[in-house]
Amino acid sequence: MELTLTISELSEKTGLSIDTIRYYEKIGILPSPHRKSNGRREYTSGDLERFIFITHLKRTQMPLKEIDRYIQFYMDQDYEGCYQVLHKHKEDIEMQMAEMSMALEKMNYKLDNFKSLVADQNGKRS
Amino acid sequence: MELTLTISELSEKTGLSIDTIRYYEKIGILPSPHRKSNGRREYTSGDLERFIFITHLKRTQMPLKEIDRYIQFYMDQDYEGCYQVLHKHKEDIEMQMAEMSMALEKMNYKLDNFKSLVADQNGKRS
DNA sequence: GGTTGACATGGAGTATACTCCAGGCGATAA
DNA sequence: TTATCGCCTGGAGTATACTCCATGTCAACC
């Protein structure tokens, strides 16, 4: 008794809309899942895990094309390819994080400024 | 003798394309710069600073609409509004950074896996 | 005086990533 | 039995952010 999920259950668990899930399948990011006799999609826990990993990649700004490349390598058992794609993305993430901490610093400075400006304006008003 | 920049100089200094700069002006993200007598745009060092700050916001995934909101507040001298927009974006960045470090962890794990898999495949081959 | 080059404009086109819709089907509930 | 529900498909539509193009002007250089 293997546990399977309907598309709406997968949607709930991943936070991706049903349309998005079907869209990913359409553009080939994931192989078509097994279908029940009535034609409905049936997702395994393995499928769920793959979708969850994809959402991690997506939330770190990996383009769908790159995600697709990764999945294709994986399906071809080209683990060297998988490694390359992931490694590049890792570097991208590290660069993004560096930019974000720089931005954070500048924003903290600006936020302080605005705080004083607001205080000044309130002072004048009263 | 105030130093000014042409649009191509601004483009070089910010990394934004000339078309992008004009596009930002068109959608109102920045007020139109001063024009020379012949109609060409002339940017001041203040304009340059504003553009650079915008590129920081953009590289941390702030949507143009939000950047626009921020600039509008700034021009209305609504510093409370500026504060709110920036503060929200700051929280977004912090969330993104948290997601990125999570993703990094998972990726490091996967990268290790792929490394062993590649080693195994090479071992078999030889 | 002609050509080149940097700039100008308005508008069309592109890439990415969805999101929505019309029309249809099969199982369950009233 | 009929209505509803969840799912199906193909295709159109939308949002965001550019990017490109045709056409035109103006100043400078040869």
Image: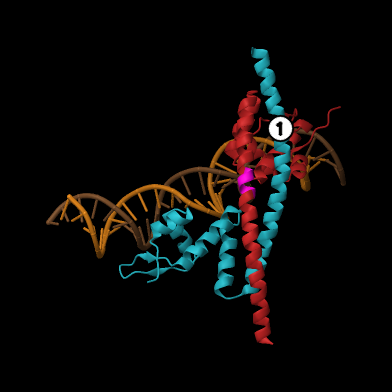
Chain colours: A cyan, B red, C orange, D brown
Q: Is residue B16 visible?
A: no
Residue, far bottom: B126
* Residue B3, placed above or below residue A101: above
Q: Residue at x 68, y 51 (%)?
A: A96
Q: Nearer the viewer, residue B106 or A25?
A: B106
Q: Is residue D26 left or right of residue A64?
A: right
**Residue C17 position in % (x across, y down):** 53, 53
| Spot occupied by residue B87 in the image (x, y as percentages of width and height) | 63, 35
Q: Mark yes or no: residue A115 visible.
A: yes
Quick one: label 1, few (<14), some, or many (20+) residues within 10 Å?
A: some
The answer to which of A114 and B73 lies nearer the viewer is A114
Mark 1 lies on a secondary structure that is helix
Residue A110 quadrant: top right
Q: Chain of mark 1?
A: A
Left or right of residue A28, residue C6 in this image: right
**Is residue B19 on the magenta stretch?**
no
The magenta segment: B93-97
Location of residue A13 in the rendering, given as x and y in whole percent from the top left corner: 45, 56
Identity of the residue furthest to the front in this view: A1
Secondary structure, magenta segment, majority class: helix
In magenta stretch: residue B96 = yes
The C terminus of chain B - image quarter: bottom right
- Which residue position holds label 1? A110
Residue at the spot 65% in from the left edge and 85% down from the top edge: B124
Q: Quadrant for residue A56, please give it.
A: bottom right
The x and y percentages for residue B51 are: 71, 37
